[in-house]
Amino acid sequence: MRVALINPKFRLPIDTRTTPHLGLAYLGAVSERRGDEVRVYDADVEEQPLADFLHEFRPHLVGITANTPQVNPAWRTAAAIKKELDIPIVLGGPHVSVVSEDLDFESLRQPPVDLVVRGEGEVPWIEICNIVDSFLRDQGDGHVTGTSEVPVTSRLMVPQLDLFRDVKSTSYKTSDGQLHRNTDGPVIADLDSLPWPAYNLFKMDRYTNLQPATDAVDGSRSFSIMTSRGCPYRCTFCSQSIMPIKWRARSSENVVEEWRHLVQDLGALEIGVLDDSANIRRPRLMQLADMLIAEKLNHVPWIFVNGIRANLADMDLLVKMKQAGLKRTAFGVETGDPDMLIRIDKHVDHDTIRQAFKNAKAAGIETIGFFIIGLPGDTRASMQRTIDFAIELDPMIANFSMMTPYPGTAVYREVKKHGRFLMNDWEDYVFFDQRARYELGDLTAELVEEMYRKAYRQFYWRPKYIVRTLRRKDFWMNFGRNARLAWRTVVPRREKTALRQAMGAAL
Ligand code: B12
Ligand code: SF4
């Protein structure tokens, strides 16, 4: 069967670099293992128009990925596909996985969307492929022509057959328009059973690299890896719809084998480790580091892109990881205010965070701090404490995000109940824009936007920071991009956001 996997176009309001989509790379790998002919269409880097791609490849099944700001483009893509070919369309990814807000059904209500996969996709995706494949074979429909009187998709989705009723973690729409939601399936217990991501399906030379945590290297030589999935914590702001609370890790042997493949076969010059919480089990990381050293894979720098838990980052572990090639690590600090830190359920205190930064710096590892401006309950004083704490920790990169309440999070529920959203579209759910995303009590958009700009100004326009930055080679490698970012964050916007004015006028 021919299977197409699509990453719909979505441009962030800042100048981002591009990276192959790891989720699609995993789905492509399991499909290839099933024996399918697979193509990835990544609209971020693709030059061929979608219609041409579809007519050239003539897929039997299409899967589209969608996080929250990408879901409208995903629907538009689905509509464009159905205009060209009569084929079943499956949506998956973080947005459609938020069952608490019925977001699987929201997508199924879009005419061109037939199925939604919630959460980890590999197992349900393959079950769907099996069902569609045997249906097409039974129908003698080796090729999708769309010329039969009853369209292929309608025949596949007839309620009398109800072909997808046993596919766990899947929601679907039968041809009578009824929406169905199957129960959740178990998480993938043995991650070693998964094939490695199929980078062979991507036009690697068109990517730049992971941002903002990594440095500018040739995109085709910058890779991601995920050594564990899930996170046992539930911070109030974090969108955890895809990765369940059950944390699982691959074996070190399995990780090292993929690492070797990236370094030796694909020529990786840099590796971004994408785990949500890589250091949940310390002995595992120690073993992994030992193996990277023993296997002489430690000459390629790697980076914890998403942050590791500060409460589990002791000196011995960090020194060992530095020896294993760890160049830079992020920590989720979020707030400098002690009460807010408790309120967001981070389960860490400021002294522990201080110590983790000290340890990392002493071990010779560069640091990134993630901070949030405008958490529910934040005040001018608490946000100032966040800025002050960032300056005290003095990481190499401070990343201040505008609090964006993603559906399914505790913050989203709180704003829904007591505040008001300043977004009228899922495409606004990005946090590197300068605009406030909601208002709650005394936390006004003006205040949050003012403090957001202040955070960047106060952190980055320190003489000590500027001198140190100018001495870094990486800074000059990224000079154009850094200059654009600095300009955007320093120049204040005088007007209120256009969106807020529109919302105000509507009330
Ligand atoms: C690396 C990363 C990035 C990278 C690359 C993104 C990418 N294209 O993969 C960069 C830095 C560019 C990025 C940017 C953003 N990101 Co990001 N990112 C991640 C991160 C840390 C890892 C993604 C990953 O590779 N996961 C591992 C793979 C295996 O999982 P996956 O991609 O989700 O795919 C699995 C399932 O979702 C499902 N699936 C996915 N697609 C499909 C499609 C089909 C057909 C099927 C059947 C199944 C399926 O099956 C896959 C295999 O199990 C996640 C956190 C996380 N744990 O996933 C956040 C995360 C995805 N990002 C998030 C956000 C908010 C963003 C931004 C919007 C932030 C911003 N700047 O405002 C932007 C959006 C950019 C964009 N253009 O879309 C949120 C999404 C929340 C939401 N509700 O949408 C997450 C979950 C972080 C969080 N916990 O809040 N991100
Ligand atoms: S912010 Fe980090 S620790 Fe908190 S729930 Fe998300 S991934 Fe887990």
Image (cartoon, helix red, strand yellow):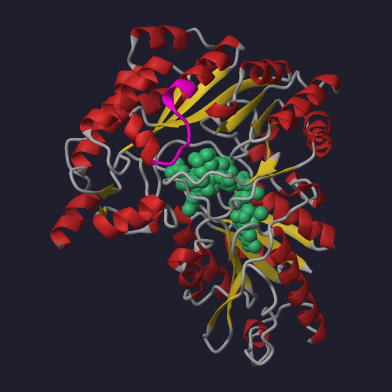
**In the figure, 373 relative to 33: above or below?**
above
Q: Position of residue 85 (x, y in %)?
A: 62, 75
User: Quick check: can you spot residue 330?
Assistant: yes
Name the foreground residue: 289 vs 124: 289
Q: Give the number of marks.
A: 0
Confirm whether the magenta stretch covers residue 347.
yes
Image quadrant occupied by the C terminus: bottom left
Q: Quadrant of the N terminus?
A: bottom right
State the residue at coordinates (76%, 48%): 191
Q: Position of residue 407 (x, y in %)?
A: 42, 57
- Determine whether, in the image, residue 102 is placed left or right of residue 83: left
- Quadrant for residue 130, please give it: bottom right
- Residue at 64 percent of width and 81 percent of height: 153
- In the rendered structure, the answer to whether residue 266 lies left or right of residue 410 reads right
Image height check: is 131 above or below 395?
below
Which of 268 and 148 lies nearest the eye of the viewer?
A: 268
Q: Within the magenta stretch, is there residue 90?
A: no
Pinpoint residue 243: horizontal percent, then vertical percent. Answer: 59, 51
- Boundaries of the magenta span: 344-352
Q: Residue at x 73, y 62 (%)?
A: 123
Name the dominant secondary structure of the magenta segment: loop
Compare residues 351 and 328 and report the one nearer the observer: 351
Q: Which quarter of the figure has residue 351? A: top left
Occupied quadrant, residue 431: top left
**Residue at the spot x=27%, y=37% of the render?**
378
